[in-house]
Image: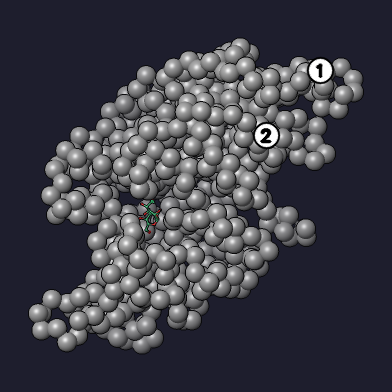
Amino acid sequence: MTEATLAHQWWKDAVFYQIYPRSFQDSNGDGRGDIPGIISRLDEIAALGVTALWLSPLYPSPDADNGYDISDYRGIDPRYGTLEDFDRLVAAAKERGIRVVMDLVINHTSDEHPWFQASRRREEPYADYYIWRPPRNLGDDSGDREPPNNWTGFFMGSAWEWDDVRQEFYLHLFDKKQPDLNYHNPAVIEEIKGILKFWLDRGVAGFRCDVISLLYKSSLEDGKPGAIRGLEHYKAQPGTHKILHELRHAVLDPYNAFTVGETVMVTLEEAKDLSDPGRGELDLVFYFDHLEVDRLVARYGPKPFRADTLLRRLTTWQRGLDWNALYLENHDQPRIVSHYGNDRHYWSRSAQMLAVLQLTLRGTPFIYQGQEIGMTNFDFTSLDQINDVESHNIDRLLRRRGVPYSLRWYLIKTASRDNARTPVQWDSSEHAGFTTGQPWLGVNANASWLNYAAQDGDPKSVLNFYRRLIRLRAASPTLRAGGFEPLIADRAVMAYRRTPTAGSTDPGYTVWLNFSDQTQRLKQPWLTSAMSDPEAGPTGAGPVHPPECVVSNTGRRRLDGCLLPWEAMVIRDGTATPWRGDAA
Ligand code: ISL
């Protein structure tokens, strides 16, 4: 592997921290987070031990989808600050050894982008920047215009919107204020190259690429029946692979830029192609299977959770890809301690158990703002408190279908993306230290006790557990890059092994996790097969230090045949050299 490639792969040793700027830290009292607010919290971020930031969109936007509808790709929304503020942030992060990665949203723009405004007026060269089509029922005199095909969007309803100015429909896979760009048009791809260079020249280290596997629509034929009709005509199409390779070759590689793709509904085979180093497209992909174990469709329709199902899905991806993007939360997903943990009776212990899951897998961890202190889902009691356009679109659709409010609210409450978007809880002051103004979204009442300040100095806190775990991982080639072997699992318990990297003195580790409120007895065969044999030792030579527990969220240091509720234990194999790290 060339020096450049090795240097390029800094992200294999990184721990990312995702910031949703709107909810992170407000500095001027307008009730929204901003860049000076982020800069004011860089020491807290650095204290966590993370080495890279992913910033959700900061570009000018009318906020139909909270910034994922961009109206100027080369600017900073004045409510977040200025380009100079951004440059200060990149420099201040660099001083702390932290790289900055931007969110790249190029499948669609805002309908208020000048490109779209010109395109709807058929002004060149923009007339063909978007996907416009006449109604399907040209001859019909009913006056009802029929969209060009039967596609539905990710925010429900038709994927087409009629435009009176152009007198045609335009495609939008997301909200109607997010028109899809036309990637059959080479001029669009050239525009994207310019945008990438603009930010790379300002020192960003790469991009998180929003719904990047949807760019190229191979056909506009009707879609097959399904949750998202039409998906088969644009998900991970050959045209998209071609575009990604062109962007990598023409712009990203010369800057050694990192890319992680958000690839909705991606299959393992698609992900292998998208992130295969030999194909020169993306470095990593975010998949979703592991977060939908207890859901019927995507994040919707809760069903019983099973640890064995989760382990099976994680194994598929841990073994299927050379390297995984490891995440349990982001700005779209429910808070993991509320989702897979027990945020009422075992809040701290289950939050720590889930931290062990994320930080003992093979790949690059992405920690979402507030996850490190165990923030929970929102405490909203009605739809009126919800901001998320996806939630409101789905509610409107369900209402039209006669679904009663109580069921609508239940479905939306458990899946709404606002669960992850309430302001970060910094302390117990009004609005949790997030703002001195009126916060744009409700602050969870549990901020009175669940906040950064209350945990910073507490060695038993979720925050300090994350800090120790990140340090442990940084010191362990096995935990970062070793092999992954599933061991055992049932409805509540899972165990897996991490096997040593070639030539490393760091031995193997066995991870035991209990995802339930009950003490779980470990079946004898599990214990003997899973525990490393202290007599054998890694090489059979010299005195052997017995296996030792290097991580425990209960204070217990021996696996005695059972796992307490929500207990996590990481057992390091017996070794010829004593463990000198600091246990978590
Ligand atoms: O989370 C999801 C799948 O379960 C979807 O709600 C989500 O919209 C999809 O993954 C795409 O997300 C990305 O693109 C959207 C934006 O609303 C999301 O915030 C972003 O993460 C459109 O840009």
Q: Within the image, what quadrant is residue 533 found in?
A: top right
The quarter of the picture where the N terminus appears is: bottom right
Residue 498: x %, y % from top left: 67, 34
- Residue 423 vertical position relative to residue 212 in the rendered view, above or below: above
- Which residue occupies 69% across, 40% down? 483
Q: Which residue is mark 1?
A: 535
- Model colouring: one colour
Q: Please, which residue is most extreme toward the right here? A: 541
Q: Which residue is mark 2?
A: 498
Q: Look at label 1 and name its amino acid.
A: Glu
- The answer to whether the residues at label 1 and label 2 have Cβ atoms under 8 Å apart is no
Q: Look at label 2 and name its amino acid.
A: Arg
Q: Is mark 1 within 8 Å of ligand 1?
A: no
Disc 2 is placed on an element classified as: strand
- Which residue occupies 87% across, 24% down? 540
- Which residue occupies 38% across, 79% down? 129
- Which residue occupies 29% across, 73% down? 149
